[in-house]
Structures are given as C-alpha cells and as structure tokens.
Image (cartoon, grey):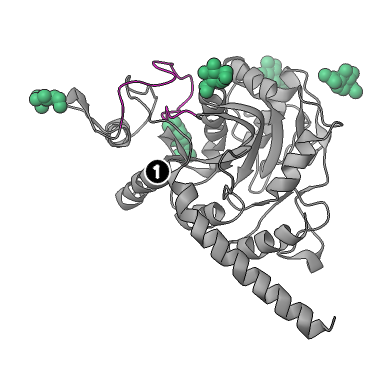
Amino acid sequence: MSRKRVRRILVVLALVLTSCVSFQLGLVWNSRSYSSDTVSEEPREELNDKGRLQEMVFRELKIDPLNSTAKSSSFTTTSLSPQISHKTFLITRRSCMQHYDLLMIISSSPGNSKRRKIIRKTWAFERSAKPRWTSVFLVAQTRDEAVSNVLLDEDEAHKDLVRASYYDHYWNQTRKIKMGFEWAVKYCNFSFLLKVDDDVFVHVPRVLSFLSAPTTPKKMFYAGNHYTNPVPFRGGKWKVTYEEYNETRYPDFCPGFGYVLSHDVVRAFVDTFSSLPFFRLDDVYVGMLASKNGINITNNVGFEVWHPPQYVCVPTKDTLVRHDVGEECQMKMFNLAIFLQ
Ligand SMILES: *[C@@H]1O[C@H](CO)[C@@H](O)[C@H](O)[C@H]1NC(C)=O
Ligand SMILES: *[C@@H]1O[C@H](CO)[C@@H](O)[C@H](O)[C@H]1NC(C)=O
Ligand SMILES: *[C@@H]1O[C@H](CO)[C@@H](O)[C@H](O)[C@H]1NC(C)=O
Ligand SMILES: *[C@@H]1O[C@H](CO)[C@@H](O)[C@H](O)[C@H]1NC(C)=O
Ligand SMILES: *[C@@H]1O[C@H](CO)[C@@H](O)[C@H](O)[C@H]1NC(C)=O
C-alpha cells in the first residue's frame, strides 16, 4: 500500500473512533454505577478557618446548618454503608455498586476541572456496560466560592468526586491519599487500586492485563517506579527538616504520580494510619506504611517518570502510567494507545 493510502485509512479510522466516543459519552456518563449517599454526622476536623469551612462542608453535604433534619432531595436517607464513621477528612459517602478489578483514584486540585474533563473523555472513559474498572477524583475544599460551586455541579453531573473537608494544598497531599484510601476500603469493592495524579496518562487496557497476569501477585502487592534507599532532600522544593524526619534514608517508595496496591494492602494501610505520625510527602508516607506492614515493592518500567525525547506524547511499548502529561498530550496519547495495545 502507498503511504498516502495508509494515511487516508488512518484518518478515516480516527474520525470513526472520535464519533463513536462522542456518541457513547452521554450514555456512559449517565450510567455511572454509584448509589446515592446519605448524610448524617458532621465531619470532625481541626481547622483554622473553622466556621467558613464548616459552611462549605454543609453546602457540600446539602444540609441546612440551622436545621439538621432538612435534606435535599438529591440525597436518599438510606445507604449501603449507613453511619460508617470516618477516621480521615473524608466526607463522601457514595458507594461503588459492583466489584471492580481496578479502582483508579486520581488526585486533583479543585481548580483543575479542565484536566478532569479531558481525563473523563480519554483514558478514564468507560466503554462497557459492566466495566472491570472505574475512576474517581480526590478533591478537597477551596476558599474560592466560584470554584467551589463548579465542583458541586461537577459532582452532581458525573458523580465521580470523592471529597474531603480540609483545604486543598500541595503539602496536604498526604491527607488526600489517606481519605482516598479510606473511601476505597469503606465504600468500594475492588481487587487493585491505582493511585495517580491528574497530569498523567494511564494505558488502562495494559494496566488491566498487567494486573491479571499469572505472574502478578494478587496480595501483598505494591508496584510502581521503585525508589531504592532514597535520601531525604534537605533543600529545594521537597526540603524536609530534621524535626520532620531525622533519619538518613526513607523507606523505599514509589513516586506519587502512579502506583498500584492490592486490596489487602490498602486495607492494612488504613488500619495503620493511626500508628504512624503525619508526614507531608505523600509518596514517602506510603513507603512508610508499606515498610511498617512488611510490604515489598515490585518495580515496573511501565511507570514512566521520564521518557526518551522522541516519545513526547507517544506511549512506549512499556507505558502503563506516564508522568507529566499535559492537557494537549492526553488526546494524542489516548488515540495512539488504542492502536498500540
Ligand atoms: C426543618 O426542615 C424540615 C424538613 O424539611 C421542615 O419541615 C421544617 O419546617 C424546618 N424547620 C426550620 C426551623 O426551618
Ligand atoms: C492542610 O489541612 C489542614 C487540616 O485541615 C489545615 O490545618 C492546614 O492548614 C492545611 N495545610 C495547608 C498548607 O493549607
Ligand atoms: C462488597 O461486596 C460484598 C459481596 O458482594 C458485599 O456484601 C459488600 O456490601 C460490598 N461492599 C461494598 C462497600 O460495596
Ligand atoms: C529521631 O526522631 C525520633 C522520633 O521523632 C526520636 O524518637 C529519635 O530520638 C530521633 N533520633 C535522633 C537521632 O535524633
Ligand atoms: C521482602 O523482602 C525481604 C528482603 O528481600 C524478604 O526478606 C521478605 O521476606 C520480603 N517480604 C515479603 C512479604 O515478600
């Protein structure tokens, strides 16, 4: 076949795919399989701006703070998991309605709705009626009222936000993963959890085949880009003081842009929260949890922190999770990944 012909075929294929995707979007988004939540206790929190935050939490929960019996019609009074008390800042009580082989929790900040939108259209887009995987975004609170309102609308439309009651901040990522893990364990049935950031690309079909491979342990499993014998930075952006951490090495860990944990590991981590002091770097904190629970790391080159320059916006033969993928790259990587299973 001539090059020109091949190009024509590819263009037609791309057009067909794009229109299929747009057609299905409406169907799938309307049928995300979560139940409604119920609302009960006030979240406990130790916060500065307490009054203001509480007001937002009430809005989030759709409770009139002056009348605790009043509930909005969008919440039911029953739940699959009624009255479970939370030990983190978690406030969402929505449950998964089925078992998933893979639950992806995507760390995102309140203002990043454009990134979330692109992710929903690309790799986090569920095609099948009974999907093997699902995804949620972990988002805390913002002092910006306009953004806060957008978030409420976004959650109502997509029902895929897992919310916490603290204010979102880069140095509060540990609180975010703690509430995400708690939500996963208490409200969802899954075999593996993939934690990612909202600036990554995930090759979902490959992640699923990696996890179902006979060589992949189904328990005691923690995989990612294995950092061995990591040394704490004592300067720069990730500077950690001796008061915060006084050892010369961290336990091994995987960088936070993407790692996989088996269900038993997430459960063990949630049970260990209370016996481990807060540590600001969330990925190091996960390494500490793993070390405390005797979990070893499985290295996988598919968790790509860096990639060769000729692979900008292009998956390699190994890509499971690619770090630092901008909005402009997501669609391109997603389209290429369809051809490169
Ligand atoms: C509280 O809410 C209930 C149920 O919506 C309503 O009947 C009642 O009048 C409200 N009370 C006050 C003081 O607003
Ligand atoms: C992180 O959240 C805690 C708990 O709400 C809050 O006290 C703290 O100020 C937040 N940190 C930053 C840096 O915003
Ligand atoms: C998980 O699945 C089991 C068995 O199917 C069910 O009893 C349980 O309620 C489910 N839990 C959640 C949180 O969905
Ligand atoms: C390091 O910190 C731990 C806990 O904060 C403390 O028990 C220990 O004495 C410290 N070690 C040194 C050498 O300062
Ligand atoms: C983890 O690795 C250490 C050192 O190689 C080994 O002794 C230990 O048995 C391993 N633990 C598990 C749970 O595989």
- What is the chief secondary structure element of the magenta stretch? loop
Residue found 24% across the figure and 33% down from its top: 73
Which secondary structure, mark 1? helix
* Residue denoted by label 1: 155
Q: Position of residue 174 (x, y in %)?
A: 57, 33
| Residue type (three-letter) at the residue carrying disc 1 | Asp
Q: Residue 304: percent from the left, percent from the top?
A: 76, 50
Q: Which quadrant holds the N terminus?
A: bottom right
Above or below, 228 against 38 in this view is below
Q: Which residues are magenta?
A: 75-95
Q: Residue at x 77, y 82 (%)?
A: 5
Q: Residue at x 81, y 83 (%)?
A: 3
Q: Position of residue 134 (x, y in %)?
A: 58, 39
Q: Quadrant of the C terminus?
A: bottom right
Query: Observer-nearest residue: 73 or 276?
Result: 73
Q: Is residue 273 left or right of residue 167?
A: right
